[in-house]
């Protein structure tokens, strides 16, 4: 089961990365098209007209998809912003209770959001809702990515809750501790290195 869940989180994260790469590719095509058209105009030649219709809208959809698809992996690797001053200042037993309460509330909110995102996808399919851009994109397509990201995030929240209930330690805690160890290591400047050699 652990391998399946980790694979799901990796696949969701990879899909988010693909969305960002597609955004970069589309923007590069648009920029190349503008540069080419500007050059052709300067040479008094007919323009090529290379554009990406509805680029802003498509990039927005892809960015939202990337954001939501990356939620689960971001949680598991402790890359979300967490204010942990209180949780680090209390005894381990209290910490476990606080983690359990927070993860229970977070999982409930994630399940609620995922449920309503899926309902929105179903509505968009039933009513054939499309975007208002130059290219009428069926809204269920970008909404499906958002809903999938929320479903995977809800699973990750429940996974973390189970980890706290069974072991007392959430997965992201190990990542947080590793990051804090890295931040506490002294930085060696070139001057320090030279002094050490002499």
Image (cartoon, helix red, strand yellow):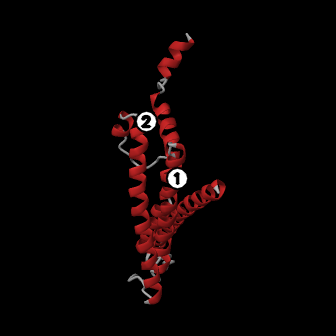
Quarter occupied by the C terminus: top right
Instruction: Please tell me which residue lies in front, 50 or 7.
Output: 7
Secondary structure at badge 2 equals: helix
Kindly identify the residue that appears in the image at 49 percent across and 31 percent down. Answer: 181
Q: Quadrant of the N terminus?
A: bottom right
Reading the image, the residue beneath label 1 is 162
Left or right of residue 113: residue 36: right
Q: Please state which of residues 138 and 68 is positioned toward the viewer in this rendering.
A: 68
Q: Outermost residue, left direction?
A: 86
* Position of residue 36 measured from the top left corner of the image (x, y, whole percent): 50, 69
**Image coordinates for residue 168, horizontal then vertical, percent:** 50, 43
Q: On the rendered structure, is 110 left or right of 28? A: left
Secondary element under disc 1, as helix, strand or loop, is helix
Q: Is residue 42 visible in the rendered structure shown here?
A: no
Q: Give the residue at the far bottom of this rendering.
A: 127
Q: Residue at x 48, y 18 (%)?
A: 192
- Residue 90 is situated, as x and y percent measured from the top left of the image, at 36, 35
Q: CA distance from mark 2 to mark 1?
A: 17 Å
Which residue is disc 2 drawn over? 92
Say which label, 2 or 1, has the lower sequence index.
2
Q: Residue at x 64, y 59 (%)?
A: 4
Q: Is 123 above or below relative to 175?
A: below
Residue nearest the observer in this picture, 91 or 155: 91
Q: 181 or 94: which is nearer to us?
A: 94
Residue 14, horizontal then vertical, whole percent: 58, 59
């Amino acid at each position: 089961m652990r391998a399946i869940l980790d694979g799901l989180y990796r696949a969701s994260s990879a899909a988010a990365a693909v969305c960002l790469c597609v955004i970069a590719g589309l923007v590069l095509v648009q920029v190349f098209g503008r540069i080419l058209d500007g050059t052709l105009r300067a040479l008094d030649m007919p323009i090529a007209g290379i554009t990406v219709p509805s680029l802003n809208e498509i990039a927005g959809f892809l960015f939202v998809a990337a954001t939501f698809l990356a939620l689960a992996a971001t949680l598991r690797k402790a890359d979300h912003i967490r204010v942990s001053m209180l949780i680090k200042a209390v005894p381990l037993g209290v910490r476990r209770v606080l983690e359990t309460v927070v993860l229970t509330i977070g999982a409930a909110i994630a399940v609620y959001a995922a449920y309503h995102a899926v309902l929105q996808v179903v509505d968009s399919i039933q009513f054939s809702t499309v975007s208002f851009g130059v290219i009428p994109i069926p809204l269920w397509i970008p909404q499906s990515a958002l809903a999938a990201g929320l479903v995977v995030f809800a699973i990750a929240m429940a996974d973390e809750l189970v980890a706290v209930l069974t072991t007392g330690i959430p997965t992201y805690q190990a990542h947080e501790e590793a990051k804090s160890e890295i931040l506490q290591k002294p930085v060696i400047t070139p001057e320090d290195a030279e002094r050490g050699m002499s």
